[in-house]
Image (cartoon, helix red, strand yellow):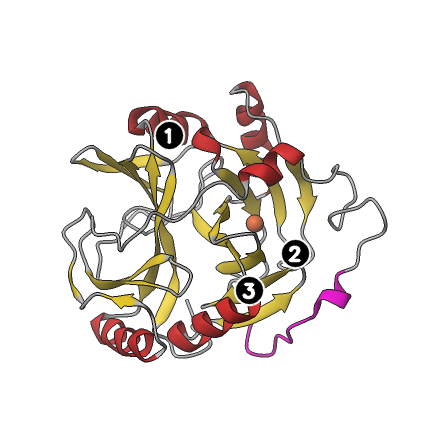
Amino acid sequence: MTNLLTGDVTGLRGVDLGVRDVAAHARFYTDVWRLAVAAERGGSVYLRGSGAYCHILALHPRSEPALLCVNLAAADRNAVDRLHARVTAAGAPRVAAPAPLGEPGGGYGFAFMDPEGRSVRVIAEDARHADARLLPDRPERITHVVLNTASQEDATAFWTRARGLQVSDRSMLTFMRCNDDHHNIAFHTGTRSSLHHIAFEMDGIDSVMRGAGRMRDAGRPIEWGPGRHGPGNNVFAYFIGPDDFVIEYTAEVAKVDANHRAREPGDWVYPPGRSDLWGATPPPSARMKAAQEKIRFAEGLFHP
Ligand SMILES: [Fe+2]
C-alpha cells in the first residue's frame, strides 16, 4: 500500500462502536453483514473482515450508541512516534503518550482527541491475519468513514496538518486519503460532530447486491442505492443497521496516485432528481438522513 505523503499513516484500520446489546449486534454483523468474530474479551466483540487487519469493527457495551474511536494504521512504531509529535504540535486538545495496546491484536499506538471531540488512535505493529484475501459476500475491510463536522474547512485543515491526509476531491463533502484509495475519511457538514456512515468494501458489485438481498431479508432494506458515486466512482448501497448506525456496502473504489487532481463542488453536478452517476436510485431516505446525525462520539479518550 503506497502512501502518497509521509508514509506514516497507511490506512483506516477500523472503528470502535459503543452499542446497547453487543450480542445482538455481533449476531447481525456476522450472520447478515458477514464479518467474522476475531476475538471476544470483557464483554466486547472484535470482528474481522476477509482482509489482514486483526479486527475492523469492535463492539463495546454502552448505555447509548456511540462512535468510540476511529483507528488509523501506521507504518511502524517510529511512524507512531512521529505522528504523536505532529498531532501534539497541531493542537489536539488531548493526546495520550504512545504505549503498547492491551486489546486483541495488540500493537503500539496512541490515542488523541481532535478539536471536534473525535477520539482517534494511531496503531502500528498490531497482529495481522495471514489468510487475507477477497471473498464473495464478505467485507474485506472498512474503506471509509464519513464524519459530520461544523466546519469542513477546519476539520480538513487539522487532519491534513496532524496526520498528513490529503484532499482527493470536494463535493458536498471533503474526501481525504492516506493511501491510494480515493478516500478513507470524508467530512460532511452537520449540525454537530457525529457519525455520518461507515463503508465496508466488498469484492464486487454482485457481493454488494447479494448483501442488499440479505439486508432486505433481515428487514433492513436499501435506504439509498444501488448507485455509483461521483467522487471515488464507487458502487454503493446504504442501510440502517442496529442502533441506527448507517452502514454502506461498497465496491470498486477508485485508486488514485500522485497525479490525481482534486475536483471542486461545481464538477459534480447531477441532473435534477438524480443523486448519483447511474440515476437509478431514488434520493437518500429521510429516515437515513436522520440516522446520519444521531451517533455521536463518546466523550473522552477511549482506552480499551
Ligand atoms: Fe460512503
Comes first in the chain, label 3 or label 2: 3
Real-space CA distance between mark 3 and mark 1, rounded to the nearest whole angstrom: 36 Å
Give the amino acid type for the residue marked by disc 2 in the picture: Asn
Of 126 and 58, which appears nearest the observer?
Answer: 58
Nearest-to-viewer mark from 3 and 1: 3
Specify few, some or many for label 2: CA neighbours under 10 Å numbering under 14, 14-19, or 20 or more: some
Comes first in the chain, label 2 or label 1: 1
Q: Position of residue 217 (x, y in %)?
A: 55, 19
Quadrant of the rendered structure where residue 24 is?
top left
Real-space CA distance between mark 2 and mark 1, rounded to the nearest whole angstrom: 28 Å
Of 205 and 33, which appears nearest the observer?
Answer: 33
Residue under the point 36% across and 69% down: 9
- Mark 3: which secondary structure? loop
Give the amino acid type for the residue marked by disc 3 in the picture: Ser
Nearest-to-viewer mark from 3 and 2: 3
From this view, report whether residue 205 is shown above or below residue 73: above
> Horizontally, is 93 left or right of 259 in the view?
left
Specify few, some or many for label 1: CA neighbours under 10 Å numbering under 14, 14-19, or 20 or more: some
In the picture of the structure, the residue carrying the numbered disc 2 is 233
Q: Which residues are magenta?
A: 256-268
Asked if the residue under mark 1 is in contact with the one under mark 2, i.e. CB atoms within 8 Å, the reply is no
In the picture of the structure, the residue carrying the numbered disc 3 is 151
In the picture of the structure, the residue carrying the numbered disc 1 is 30
Q: Position of residue 187 (x, y in %)?
A: 54, 59
Residue under the point 79% across and 46% down: 274
